[in-house]
Image (cartoon, helix red, strand yellow):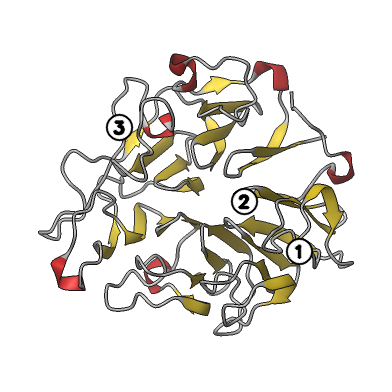
Amino acid sequence: MPENIVSILSNARSIAGGYAHSLAVASDGTLWGWGLNGNYQVGDGTNTNRNAPVQIGSATDWVAVATGDYHSIAINSSGDAYGWGKNASGQCGTGGGATVLSPTIITMPETVAINKIEAYGDHSLFGDTLTLAKVYGCGANDQGQITGSASDVAQKNTPVEITQFAGADLFAASRDFSVAAKTGEVIVNGQQDFVADYDTNTAGLRRILSGALPGVPSGETFISLSASDACVFLINSTGEVWGFSDLASNGQVSTNQDPIFRLPDQSFWGYASVPAGNLYKNYSFYDQRTDAPAAAKVAAGREHLFIIGQDGYLYSYGDNTYGQLSRTSSTDTDLRTITKIEAAGSGWTNVACGGYHTLATLGT
């Protein structure tokens, strides 16, 4: 291990995995993509699947990439954001719903220098966390994942400010919600009830809320945040791994798959809205994974999780149907335990989980 080394992308600056495509920024600032490309998400101007990395354009000032299911976003050293791929929900941020064939600049609502981006499903997030301390979003908003409001569930074809996330240090996108973290606070925008507890005051829509997760210590600070379909993982400043998830979403708490949502004792992380307006039910909790190493970075895929430990080793957890954990063992007990990948060695600097695959970079 690792299973495959992409030599042309040694010392990659940034990596991202979508549903079935991947992006990377090489050490020289060039942009590369490969994988499923039916929606032009690779960015080379074609819809031909790419089994090996192809360079996207000729620019050498790319800094970071992020991927949704079938779209991609990137930023350059000037803080400009670009989007391409499927755009039916406005997730590329370029206006309208037409598929975007190659990287196209995104007009932000004000003068910003975007330094952080995240994407998932059909929406995208952009942050100017250094100067303005603001976060913006575009794309699907049917569950309030951008606005956090039941009165505004229209898709956003260009980025709008997410006011609830102002001052956030970290943020992440999930399928039907967005999450941000700042000192002593974890804030969730969007669908917070996956168990069909409907709010009759919003014309049958599931509850669309914006609220802070209870139980977070007031002085807690975070260094890494990642979200999957319905689960959030965080690493605090002391390297502890914490998280929460819903109780039932798209069948993702079955015993045969998706163990990402279980603690080692087989209990669940979980939350769900209640009609009374109390954001989380009392059996839901923000909990620590005691089987995790002292961690530096966390990355969640649809049904699997990776951690880079402070020791530089990779640790994996969850579903391994497609080999996404890079493990040989496939027993249920093993998959439900965060396990060090000894064979991969140490010195890992970054990790990104796609839908059913994983990317990682090894330092020199």
Indicate whether 323 appears above or below 189: above
Q: Describe residue 359's horizontal placement relative to residue 97 as left or right.
A: right
Kindly identify which residue carries mark 3: 268
User: Residue placed at 36% from the left, 26% from the top?
Assistant: 255
Mark seen at residue 360: none
Provide residue 163's location: percent of width, then percent of height.
Answer: 39, 74
Identify which amino acid the numbered label 1 is placed on: Gly
In the image, 4: left or right of 222? Answer: right
350 relative to 201, above or below:
above
Rendering coords of residue 48 (x, y %): 78, 57
Residue visible at 28% across and 65% down? Answer: 208
Q: Secondary structure at mark 2?
A: loop
Near-viewer residue (257 or 240): 257
Label 1 element class: loop
Q: Position of residue 106 (x, y in %)?
A: 65, 78
Residue, disc 1? 43
Looking at the image, is 293 positioned above or below residue 186?
A: above
Quarter of the image for the C terminus: give it: top right
Which badge, 3 or 2, is on the more N-terminal residue? 2
Nearer to us of marks 3 and 2 is: 2
Callouts 2 and 1 close, C-beta under 8 Å: no
The CA distance from mark 2 to mark 1 is: 13 Å
Residue neighbourhood size for the residue with mark 1, other residues' Cα within 10 Å, grouped as few (<14), some (14–19), many (≥20): many
Mark nearer the N terminus (2 vs 1): 2
CA distance for labels 3 and 2: 26 Å
Check disc 3: other Cα within 10 Å, few if <14, some if 14-19, many if 20+.
many
Residue depicted at 62% across the width and 82% down the height? 107
Q: Which residue was labeled with disc 2?
A: 18
How far apart marks 3 and 1 lie (CA) works out to 39 Å
